[in-house]
Every structure is written in structure tokens, then in C-alpha cells.
Image (cartoon, helix red, strand yellow):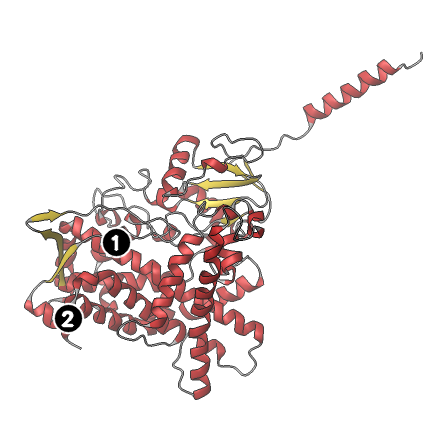
Amino acid sequence: MAINSLDVGLAFVGLITLWILLRPKKAPLPPGPKGLPIIGNVFDMPVDQEWLTFAKWGEEYGPLSSVTVLGTPIVFVNSAKVAQEMLDKKSSLYADRPVLQMGGELVGWKNALILLPYGDRFRRYRRFFHSVIGSNALMRPYRPMQEMQTRQFLRKVLKDPEQLQEHLRHTAGAIVLRISHGYEVQEKDDPFVALADKANGEFSIASTPGAFLVDTFPALRHVPQWFPGGGWKKIIKPWSETLLEVSNRPHNHVKQQLAAGTAPVSFSSTLLDRKDVSAEEDFDIKWASFSMYAGGSDTTVSSIYAFYLAMTLFPHVAKKAQAEIDAVVGTDRLPTFDDREHMPYSNALLKEVLRWNAVTPIAAPHVAIQEDIHDGYLIPKGSVIIPNIWKILHDPQMYPDPMTFRPERFIASEGNKLENDPRQYCFGFGRRICPGQHLADGSIWIGCVLTLAVFDISNHVENGVVNIPIHENTRGTISHPKPFKCTIKPRSEKAASLIMME
């Protein structure tokens, strides 16, 4: 029997049909809003308070949702459970960072730890950090300095309470610069503190998702400044210069002190005080040291400023914490870190500050190093993973009545279910967890406790009108409560004398 062309065609169609039916089905991407052809969800991406939009998508599509922007999947994690399962337990798969054109490549933050690609240099930075401030035990020698700087902060607030934010920035900068570079800040207008503040503000804007179109369309980096729509390139040069200055000046200061034999012990001086430091090692030490004080100063400021806001809005919490401080410490001295283990309410207060006001509402993005299947969903290699810290810390399943400031949620008692410690989430996940978390935790705690020991904080009254602040946050990678007014007064004459006591 002769085989004709029709038989061959039918056989071919049959084989193709069989292949389609039997081939392994690829898992789908996590669900999310439907995008447009080619460009995907470009126009769905928010440019302000992104965490609220991502949280809304989480409620609509589930704890793992996604969009696609120009072919790149962006996956949003709105659940602590999913974040820990993906980013902690499978940290080796999700340890990379995306290439940010504006903040990373064009301005230069790609050399700082927060945007550093995963690899040998990243691991060297982490080893540096862990060797100096990687545990509470390693932080112990720095605790007296943190106490001293915070007592100086109290004196500044007593003298000029209306400059609260400025005092916070000065104190946070003083603590981190002393540890990172052995640098003693000037009492007023310190150049290094001012530089760090400026650089952090510029980074917060440059790294905000959707803030610059070049991060979505990388080819725009080649558009000349004079071209229509290219005006954004005007800020690259001054922002790059700020970054270079803020990374070079403190580093050179330490090297000059080492040459003169006057360098105090610090992160930088310890690592540089060898005769065989290569140019590559010098580069790594410079940027690792910069990463410490750039990352540690602004985040601490945001948390303690949020604490002042919370004490203004919830005076009953302040009274309860003050009662504990008075019972443990008395009124004849100021609290120290040695008192911390005896103060469960003040520790719960710290946790609630970190939960209530997420300093980084969305964590710095992770990138999938290789393809993964999670909860039945495909996570392609190169996918950008964005943990929504704000949503996790305001999840009513984990924190009932999440918008209420209630430290008691972190104190075990009869009839009270102990809630999850927010420090598991607010410092990040996996191999990208903040290496300065013990430094930040200590600085925030001592700042809160010393403040409550000596100050009463209340609503600001102007012309007989009580000004009740609202908890609103600024945009940016590092978010702060928007400026507010409050009244800060010594609790007593004895408290005022304690503040002024050296």
C-alpha cells in the first residue's frame, strides 16, 4: 500500500498533537494585574507609597503576586511565611540584587553593600561586618559610647527641642562614624554628618522603584541631556560627586591618622592597619565602611523620630514605660544597657516602634539567581523579588489591630498570645539581612529609654489649639514620618539635672 502525502501530513499533525498533550506543563507565574503586550505592567507600577499598592495586590491575588515589566517578572511577597520560606530557607537562590540604572550604575551606589551584586566582593563585605558588629557580644565595647552620645542628645533636646530631627541626625551620625571610622563628630555642623545625610537622601530618591524611567528603559541612559525628556541627567553628576566625597573623605581621614599613629580603634582602622593591604582590599574596606555609616545613620533617625511621634499620639504608653524605668532604675541615675534585661515593657516598646513604622516599607529588591518553583508558581531566573515589609508588619493575621500602637502584644501574659518579633522581618531576609541590626537595635533602644527617663512628650499647643499629628510617611527607599510638632519637657527638676550631669 503506497503512502501518500495526506497520510504523511496526518501523521505529522498527530505527532505534534501528542507532543503538545504529553509535554511537561510549565508552572505559571504568580497571579497579578493583567498587563499590555510587550511592555507588560509598566503603567501599573506606582511611584508613591508603593507598599500600599503592593499590599492591595497581595489582598487581591494572594501572598505571592507578580507583574511583568518589559519581559522581567517582578514578584511581590506580602506574607512573612512566604518571605521566610523563599528568602531565608532558599537564600542562596535569591541573594542577588537587580541592576539599578539610576542609583546603582549612573550615580555609583553599586559599590555599596545594599546594591552590591552577590559574589566574592559581597561575601568579603559581610565578613568585615560580622567581625566587628555581627553580634551583641561584639557590640558590647561600643555600648558606653552609644550611651554617652545619647546623653549628649538629651542635652541638645533640652536646650532646643524644636530641632529634634537635627539632633537625631547628629547623634546617629556620631555613633556610626565613631564605630566605622573612629571619627569624633563636631558639636555643630559636622561636615561628615552633613555629607552622609545628603547622600542618603539622594540614594533614597534614586533607588525608589518607578522614580526614574531609565530603570525601566535602560537604553535611556544613552540619551543626551539636551534631548527632550533628558533633563533628569542633570542630577547624575552632582549626586555622583556627593557619593564619591562621602565615601572618600572619611576613608582618607583614617589613613592619615594611621600614618600619624593617632587612629583610634574602628572598623576601618582595624582592617587598614596592615602593611600588605592591596588596592582591591583598600577599595573594599572603603566601601564597606561607607556602607556601615550610610546604612546605619538614616534608618536609626527614622525609628527614633517615629518613637517621638508614637509617644505624642499614645501618652498612656509613655506613662507605662516610665513607670517601669522608675521601678527598675529609680530617679537618681539614667538607664544603661545593663538595665535592659530587667525592662520587658521597654523592649516591647522598641519592637512596636519597629513594627508600627516600617523604616524600609519595601525591602531592597532581591533577584533570583536561578529558576525556582515556589508554591506551584514559576519564579524565572532574573526575576525581581520585592518583600513588602510594611504589609508583613501590618498583617492582621500576625498582628491583630495592626494600626494601633500596642507594645503589650510583645509581652507574654495570661490570655495574651505573644506575637511575632518584628525584628525577624524589618532588617531583611536571608543573605541580604542587614549586618548592622545589632547596632541599630541598641541605638534605638537606648534612645527611647533615656528619652522616657527624663522627658514628657505631649501634643503641641499653639494659640490655644492642640495640634494632633498624623502618622504619614515620606516616599523613598528609607521612609521617615513626615515632620510633626510636639512638646518635649523635663519630667522634673531632678530629671533636668540628670540631663546636664556629665
**Residue nearest the viewer, comparing 332 with 165:** 165
Secondary structure under the numbered disc 1 in the rendered image:
helix
Q: Which numbered dot is residue 448?
A: none
- The quadrant holding residue 18 is top right
218 in relation to 158, above or below? above
Percent from the top left, x then y, of residue 231? 47, 51
Q: Residue at horizontal 27%, vertical 46%?
A: 472
State whether residue 130 appears in this view: no
Quadrant of the frame with the C terminus:
bottom left
Q: Please give the name of the residue rendered at 17% of the width and 63% of the height, measured from the top-left corner.
A: 161
Instruction: Mark yes or no: residue 316 visible.
Output: yes
Q: Is residue 383 left or right of residue 249?
A: right
**Which of 151/488 is in front?**
488
Q: CA distance from mark 2 to mark 1?
A: 22 Å
> Which quadrant would residue 414 be assigned to in this image?
top left
Q: Position of residue 407 (x, y in %)?
A: 23, 49
Q: Position of residue 189 (x, y in %)?
A: 29, 71
Q: Which quadrant does the N terminus fall into?
A: top right
Give the amino acid type for the residue marked by disc 1 in the picture: Ala
- Disc 1: CA contacts within 10 A as few (<14), some (14-19) or many (>=20): many
Q: Residue lying furthest bottom in this view?
A: 260
In this view, the residue farthest toward the top is: 1
The residue that label 1 is drawn on is: 306
- Given the image, on which type of amino acid does mark 2 rest? Ile
Residue ID at (40%, 71%)? 180
* Horizontal relation, residue 62 to residue 308: left or right: right
Q: Which residue is mark 2?
A: 499
> Residue at 32% across / 60% down in the picture?
300
